[in-house]
Amino acid sequence: MRINTNIQAINAYRQLSVSQNKVSKNIEKLSSGLRINRAGDDAAGLAISEKMRSQIRGLNMAERNTQDGISLIQTAEGALQEVHNCLQRMRELAIQGANGTLDEKDRLAIQNEIDQLTYDIDRIARTTQFNANPLLRGSLLARPVITTNATEIKYEGSGTWNGNVVAEPSERGQVELQLLGNPTDAQYLAINGKYYEFEKPDDPTDPNDSKWGVQAGHIAVRVGSNETETLQNLLNAIGQNDNTFDIKASEINGSSLILKTSKNMSPSDANQIEVNKWTANVKFVDNLSNEATKPETDKLNAPDTSTNWKTIYLNFTELPKAGDQLIIDGVEIKFEDTSTPYKDGKAIVGVKDRTVYDVLAEVYNVIAAAKNDSKAEALVDFKVNGSSLILSTDKTDGKTKTGSNNGLDIEFRDNDFETYAGKEMEIKLQIGANYGESMNLLIGVVDSAFLGIARYADHKGVISTAGVDAEAGISVLTEEDAQNAIVFFDNAIRLVSESRSRLGAYQNRLEHTISNLTTTAENLTAAESRIRDVDMALEMSEFTKNNIINQAATAMLAQANQLPQGILKLLQY
């Protein structure tokens, strides 16, 4: 018998440690619900289940992707339904306009509705988006690098937009007439196409005295006792016969009449109103410069600036590409790979490895340099906000009295726009859990130009470049035009039907894809569960067994620790 080493206790302790470890694992599995909590529980099972988990999670995400794809399709298809409704109404109106019982005013009313429906088709194409991405404008490359809210800037072809932006006038047009003495009888003025003939009475104090009368088609203006009275009579005659002018706003100062228009006017509007004289007694005075103008004919003047600034936005939809160009009131900004500093109204802005915001910051600096160089005179304010360049002008018209440009000239060129115009937008959906398991959606352009119903403002010229908004709708102003319009609307309805049909086929396919994904994910989840999850009943049985063994081992360890006490009996003798 030995007391230094208790082999029985060591053995019992070892068995107790083993049983306690088993009970610990049993408790861990029962509390987590997993059979494999660490690689040591089942190395091969862990590797297999993790691979299954990646597939399951990939399938679940693919299902979400597919549902997003269906939502995208439904968004596009819902917009196309409204396009269909517009086209059906337009075709109905064309049939109505083809009826011979209508007169010109009736067809004009029909034309106005067709124009508005055409504009709305472009609006739908422009604003229908999913996650901020336009759906009905076609390929991303077929969208202009710059868009604008300025209706004056129109597409001119070859990827070029340009226009002259002007502010609303804030002052009236006017002209100053100065009498150099009372006119003689039968002399006259032509103002805005109306003839005002001076009639000199024998007795100026008698309001009913008339010497000869006036020519047929002329308006009589009684010659007064002095120039002021004569001008007042002229002003009264103008007020009674031409509402273009505001008599109350017009002024008489001695022998001068400052004739002002009823409405605020720009220089070109004022220049449409001519004043011709057939009397040597009238002198034209330019109110703006107070200098004598041409001796026989003058046009009304109007300020070329306004307190009503016009502000436009140039929105950069993407980073400009090398070769694109922006011209702001004569300041040429070209986009290339690398930059060149501003000089003499020109600059090159680099776009390689840069963002839109970097490019706009440099464009801003170029404009600032041009303003310091006394260029871009029509530009009174400019700033950058996000991806937009904001420009303001106070110029009131595109043409001055001398015929030169007065407004803010804007031109931008997208070199590859027409190359991709009308091409379908391709959207790749990841509909599987693995590489390459994707599906391509093709969504075509559905704007008025692509549908063949976009026209220029004259209702005749065809706008055929997809992505360019219509200026007017198809003409139904005559019976023949209305008949021809029916054919165009039939073709447009067919094109939209084809697009909707294809989107419907995509949606049906994706719905089947979702069914397949959910079934596969369910089966893989069941297989992964069999590997990873614990069988609670079986594990509880193991726990009960191991717990009993643990209790027995504890009792035996206690007994083994008591065995060396038997040696004390031997030591008593």
Image: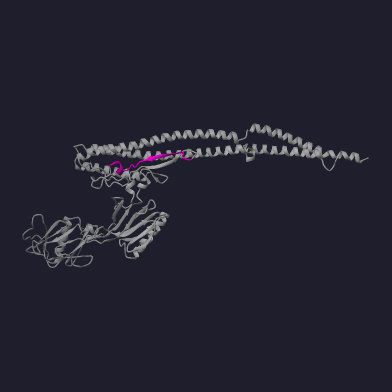
The magenta-colored residue range is: 435-452
Residue 438 is covered by the magenta coloring: yes
Give how far across and how far down residue 344 sits, in percent: 32, 64
* Residue 131, quarter of the rendered image: top left
Residue 9 is covered by the magenta coloring: no
| Front in this rendered view, residue 270 or 398 | 398
| Front in this rendered view, residue 531 or 204 | 531
Q: Quadrant of the N terminus?
A: top right
When the figure is inspected, residue 61 is found, relative to residue 257, above or below; the finding is above
- Residue 454 visible: yes
Give how far across and how far down residue 71 sits, in percent: 42, 39
Q: Quadrant of the C terminus?
A: top right
The reply, left or right, for residue 30 in relation to residue 445 is right
| Front in this rendered view, residue 37 or 270 | 37
- Residue 249 visible: no
Give how far across and how far down residue 100 sits, in percent: 18, 37
The reply, left or right, for residue 251 in relation to residue 64 is left
When the figure is inspected, residue 115 is found, relative to residue 216, above or below; the finding is above
| Front in this rendered view, residue 434 or 232 | 434
> How has the structure been colored for display?
one colour
